Amino acid sequence: MNIYSKAAIKGSVKYPETIGYAAFIPSDGKTMVSLSVYGLPKGSEIFAVHIHEGTSCTGNSSDPFANTKSHYDTAGSPHPYHTGDLPPIFSEDGTSRFAFLTGKFTPEEIIG
């Protein structure tokens, strides 16, 4: 079954204006990942992007992303080779749009 999935992107307490979405679209046994992110800090910045094992991007006052857990990894690989380690995004004006094709996972495998 081909399942399309989408995830909301919301910045941390440090970057509350950062918002966006990630779409995961099945494509010939692989996954097309499309990211649109707005409100990133201005300047020539590189931002890491990961899929995590947790089911919620929440946490507590000392760690706002405590519930994300570790990077999603199906093969026991070291960082930056986890299944959920995605290419970085780049932004100079606070906006980033990026799409790529990966065979590391399918949308069905990352839902939840």
Image (cartoon, helix red, strand yellow):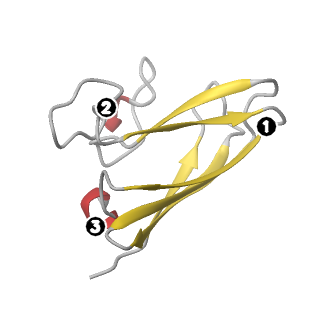
Contact, mark 3 vs mark 2 (Cβ under 8 Å): no
Element type where label 2 sits in the image: loop
Name the side, left or right, on which 1 lies relative to 92. Answer: left
Residue farthest toward the top in the current orientation of the protein = 62
Viewer-nearest of discs 1 and 2: 2
Up/down of 89 relative to 111, above or below: above
Quarter assignment of residue 102: bottom left
Residue drawn at point x = 34 percent, y = 64 percent:
107
Inter-mark Cα distance, 3 to 2: 20 Å
Residue identifier under label 3:
108
Residue identifier under label 2:
81
The amino acid pointed to by label 2 is Tyr
Viewer-nearest of discs 3 and 2: 2
Element type where label 3 sits in the image: helix
Name the side, left or right, on which 42 lies relative to 102. Answer: right
Up/down of 9 relative to 77, above or below: below
Residue drawn at point x = 31 percent, y = 24 percent:
79
Residue drawn at point x = 31 percent, y = 51 percent:
104
Residue identifier under label 1:
94
Q: If you read the primary sequence from the N terminus, does the residue marked by circle 1 or circle 2 appear first? A: 2
